[in-house]
Amino acid sequence: MPYIQTSKLQLYYECVGTGDPLLFISGTGADLRNKPNFLDGPAPKIFETLAYDQRGLGQSDKPGVAYSMADYADDAAALLDAMGWDHAHIIGVSFGGMVAQELALRHGNRINRLVLACTSPGGRGGASYPLHDVQDMDLETRVRHMIPISDTRNNAAWASANAETYEAMVAFASTDAFKGETGRAEGAMRQLEARKHHDTWNRLPNIACPTLICGGKFDGIARPETQKKMAARIPNAKRAMFEGGHLFMLQDRTAIQTMIAFLQEN
């Protein structure tokens, strides 16, 4: 299996496709063993697309120490080094967008074009929904709590009118095939703790690469108004909003195509 060993830990990754290099940085709790994922979409038809399990998650190492957002950004830069990529396009989604912000601030010379999707800067710019506050709930209770936040259209009235669909969503999101793996719960908690302290707001004007801010119009986790603030804060950033909630990339077929078109601009 493909791993790279950095100076700090071992990271599991997968790379498919040909073309200009593209690093995809995934969100909270993401695990490449869960299929389908971004690598199964259209991007590898156009780019050499790299995705990985972040520290504490999936098949990557789960160090028993506190994680910082700087650690996550440096992990991403180390992965670029291991691939021999001097530069790459970056797509960061949700928590991955927070990592991508830190990557752009700490290793900005490595980024060609940057997409920040359904994410937040923290601080005075606004934080994403505090997932650390609900982590102690049992999984099904947490899923039911988050469904109307992830997509604000899916409120109690919608759930009542669409009971079969709602229960199917709950059942799907409440399944964790890898629950109980050594270090899994601890790694997830350390990721949430790093997320809790994320704050790039005062530094966002230092992001120099071409940037596209994307979000869902009905996202209650990374709110639309936060996307607007970020786009105004990052020099010359573009913004595109789509029909969906936090999962807008799955809900609106035009979203990934818009991202790809942005990355292909000269």
Image: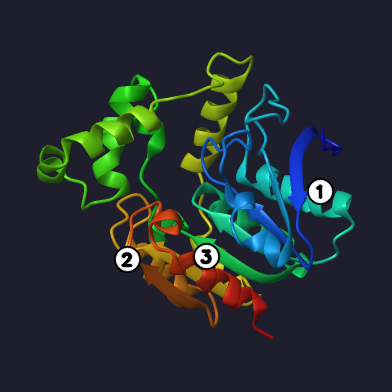
- In the image, 228: left or right of 185? left
Disc 2 marks a residue whose amino acid type is Glu
- In the image, 122: left or right of 36? left
| Tag shown at residue 78 | 1
Q: Marks 2/3: CA distance?
A: 21 Å
Q: Residue 121, how many percent across, how many down?
A: 47, 58
The quadrant of the picture occupied by the N terminus is top right
Disc 3 marks a residue whose amino acid type is Ile
| Tag shown at residue 256 | 3
Q: Residue at x 40, y 57 (%)?
A: 248
Give the mark toward the camera: 3 or 1: 3
- In the image, 148: left or right of 133? left
Q: Marks 1/2: CA distance?
A: 33 Å
Give the mark toward the camera: 2 or 3: 3
Q: Residues within 10 Å of mark 3 (few under 14, many from 20)?
A: some
Q: Residue 156, how many percent across, how many down?
A: 13, 40
| Tag shown at residue 225 | 2
1 or 2: tag closer to the N-terminus = 1
Secondary structure under badge 1? helix
Question: Does residue 19 show up?
Answer: yes
Q: Residue 255, how many percent across, how many down?
A: 46, 66
Q: Is residue 222 above or below residue 233?
A: above
3 or 1: tag closer to the N-terminus = 1
Q: Residues within 10 Å of mark 2 (few under 14, many from 20)?
A: some
The quadrant of the picture occupied by the C terminus is bottom right
Question: Does residue 89 show up?
Answer: no
Task: Using the image as rendered, state which of residue 192 and residue 143 is in the foreground.
Answer: 143
Q: Residue 83, how many percent across, how many down?
A: 86, 53
Disc 1 marks a residue whose amino acid type is Ala
